Image (cartoon, rainbow, N blue to C red):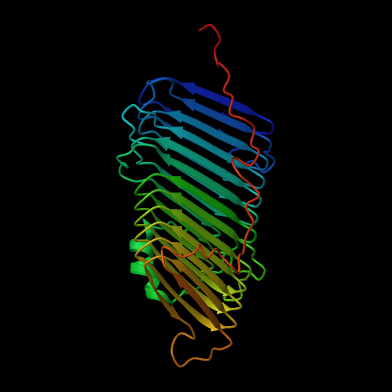
C-alpha cells in the first residue's frame, strides 16, 4: 500500500492484515507549506501480522505519524522534517514466536517528539531515535516479559547529531569509558539545546544508549535511563564532541538487578551526573571534563564497583556504597595539569548497616511521561463491510 498527499491537513490511514506486507505513506513531499498532516499505519491483528514493513515520511510542521504493529519481526521507519512534529511507534511481539521488532524515528527540526513502545517475551527489539534540532524529546520503553531473557533489547537515542552508534560503543565506550577520562571534544559543535530523552527497559540482557550533542552554553539537556533486571548495560554521553563551554546538562541512570553496568560521560561545565544501582556485582563508571561538575553515585548490594574520574576545577564527587564494594576516584586529570578546588566524599557501610540514603541529591526532573499527550492510536475500519 502506498499513499502520497500534498498540502495541509491531510489524513492517511492504512490497515493491513497478514504477513509480509509493506506500507509507505508520504505527506508534504518537500512542499514548504505542508503542515498539520496525520499518517496512521496499522499492521497485523491476532496472530496474522509477521514480517511487515511500515514507513511514513512527512515534511512540514505540526504533523503526526503513528505505526502500530503486532506479532513478530516487523520494522517501522518514520522520517519527519520540520518543527512541532510527533512520531509514535507501538510494537507488540506478543507470545507467538516473539522475535521482536525494529523501529527507527528520524526528526529534523525543533520541538519534535518521538515515542517508541516495544513488548514481547523474547526481546530482540531494536528502537532508534535520531533528532537534530532544539527542544526535542524522545521516550523509549521496552519490556521483555519472558523469563529466558531473549537475545536482548537495544535502545538508542541520538540528539543533536545524526551519528549512529554501535551497541554500547565497544562495551561501554571502548572498554569502560576510554578508559576513565578522555571526554573527547571533537570538531562537531552540534545543536541539542533543551533536549530530553527517557529510556525504560524491563527484562534481562538489555542495552540502552543516549547521546546528546548539546555543545552550547546553557544547553540544559536531560537524559534518564531506567533498567529493571539482570545483565543490563547503559551508556549516556552528553556534549562529547564540540564546544567545551556546553553546560547545564543532567544525566541520570537507575538500575535494579545484578550484573549491570552503567557508564556516563559529560564534557563542559555545571553538569550533573546521577547513578543508582540496587543489586550485586554491578559496575558504575563515569567521567566528567570541565568545571563545576557534580557526580552522585549510589550502590546497594555486594561486590559492586565504582570507577570515576574528573578533569578540571571546582568539581565534586559523592560515592555511597552499602555492602561489599570497591571504588576508584581520580581528579585533576591528566596528572600535572592545572586543576583544583575539587572535592570527594565516600561513604561505605556493611550489608547489615543502615541504608545510607543519598545526600547531595539532585532529584527531579521527570515531568513528561508516555507519549507526550499524542492522541490515542485509534485506527478506523478503512472499508466497513468489505
Res. 186 visible in picture: no
Percent across and percent down for residue 278 are 44, 57
Percent across and percent down for residue 5 are 60, 30
Left or right relative to 117: residue 283: left
Percent across and percent down for residue 262 are 42, 61
Q: Quadrant of residue 315?
A: bottom right
* Closer to us: 44 or 122: 122
- Tell me: residue 229, above or below residue 34: below
Res. 196 visible in picture: yes
Q: Quadrant of residue 167?
A: bottom left
Residue at 58% in and 19% down: 380
User: Which residue lies most toward the bottom here?
Assistant: 336
* Closer to us: 97 or 367: 367
Left or right relative to 372: residue 206: left
Q: Quadrant of residue 365?
A: bottom right
User: Which residue lies most toward the front here?
Assistant: 352
- Tell me: residue 240, above or below residue 129: below
Residue at 32% in and 42% down: 149
Residue at 45% in and 72% down: 348
Amino acid at each position: 500500500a502506498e499513499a502520497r498527499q500534498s498540502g495541509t491537513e491531510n489524513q492517511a490511514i492504512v490497515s493491513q492484515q497478514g504477513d509480509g506486507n509493506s506500507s509507505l505513506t508520504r505527506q508534504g513531499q518537500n512542499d514548504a507549506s505542508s503542515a498539520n498532516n496525520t499518517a496512521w499505519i496499522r499492521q497485523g491483528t491476532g496472530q496474522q501480522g509477521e514480517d511487515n514493513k511500515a514507513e511514513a515520511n512527512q515534511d512540514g510542521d505540526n504533523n503526526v505519524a503513528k505505526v502500530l504493529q503486532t506479532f513478530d519481526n516487523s520494522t517501522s521507519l518514520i522520517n519527519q522534517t520540520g518543527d512541532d512534529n510527533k512520531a509514535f511507534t507501538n510494537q507488540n511481539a506478543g507470545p507467538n514466536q516473539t522475535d521482536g521488532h525494529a523501529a527507527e524515528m528520524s526528526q529534523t527540526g525543533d520541538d519534535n517528539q518521538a515515542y517508541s513502545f516495544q513488548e514481547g517475551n523474547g526481546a530482540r527489539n531494536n528502537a532508534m531515535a535520531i533528532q537534530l534540532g532544539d527542544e526535542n524529546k524522545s521516550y523509549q520503553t521496552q519490556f521483555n516479559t519472558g523469563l529466558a531473557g531473549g537475545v536482548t533489547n537495544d535502545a538508542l537515542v541520538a540528539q543533536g547529531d545524526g551519528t549512529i552508534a554501535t551497541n554500547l560503543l565497544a562495551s561501554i565506550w571502548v572498554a569502560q569509558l576510554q578508559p576513565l577520562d578522555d571526554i573527547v571534544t571533537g570538531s562537531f559543535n552540534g545543536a541539542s539545546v533543551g533536549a530530553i530523552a527517557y529510556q525504560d527497559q524491563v527484562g534481562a540482557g538489555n542495552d540502552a544508549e543516549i547521546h546528546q550533542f548539546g555543545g552550547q552554553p546553557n544547553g540544559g539537556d536531560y537524559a534518564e535511563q531506567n533498567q529493571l533486571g539482570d545483565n543490563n548495560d547503559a551508556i549516556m554521553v552528553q556534549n562529547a564532541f564540540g564546544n567545551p563551554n556546553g553546560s547545564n546538562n543532567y544525566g541520570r541512570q537507575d538500575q535494579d538487578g545484578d550484573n549491570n553496568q552503567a557508564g556516563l560521560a559529560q564534557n563542559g561545565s555545571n553538569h550533573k551526573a546521577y547513578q543508582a544501582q540496587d543489586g550485586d556485582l554491578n559496575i558504575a563508571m563515569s567521567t566528567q571534563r570541565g568545571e563545576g561538575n557534580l557526580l552522585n553515585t549510589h550502590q546497594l548490594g555486594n561486590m559492586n564497583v565504582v570507577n570515576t574520574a574528573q578533569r578540571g576545577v571546582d568539581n565534586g564527587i559523592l560515592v555511597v556504597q552499602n555492602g561489599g564494594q570497591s571504588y576508584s576516584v581520580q581528579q585533576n586529570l591528566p596528572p600535572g595539569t592545572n586543576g583544583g578546588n575539587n572535592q570527594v566524599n565516600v561513604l561505605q557501610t556493611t550489608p547489615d548497616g543502615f541504608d545510607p540514603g543519598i545526600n547531595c541529591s539532585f532529584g527531579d526532573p521527570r515531568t513528561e511521561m508516555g507519549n507526550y499527550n499524542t492522541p490515542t492510536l485509534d485506527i478506523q475500519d478503512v472499508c466497513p463491510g468489505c
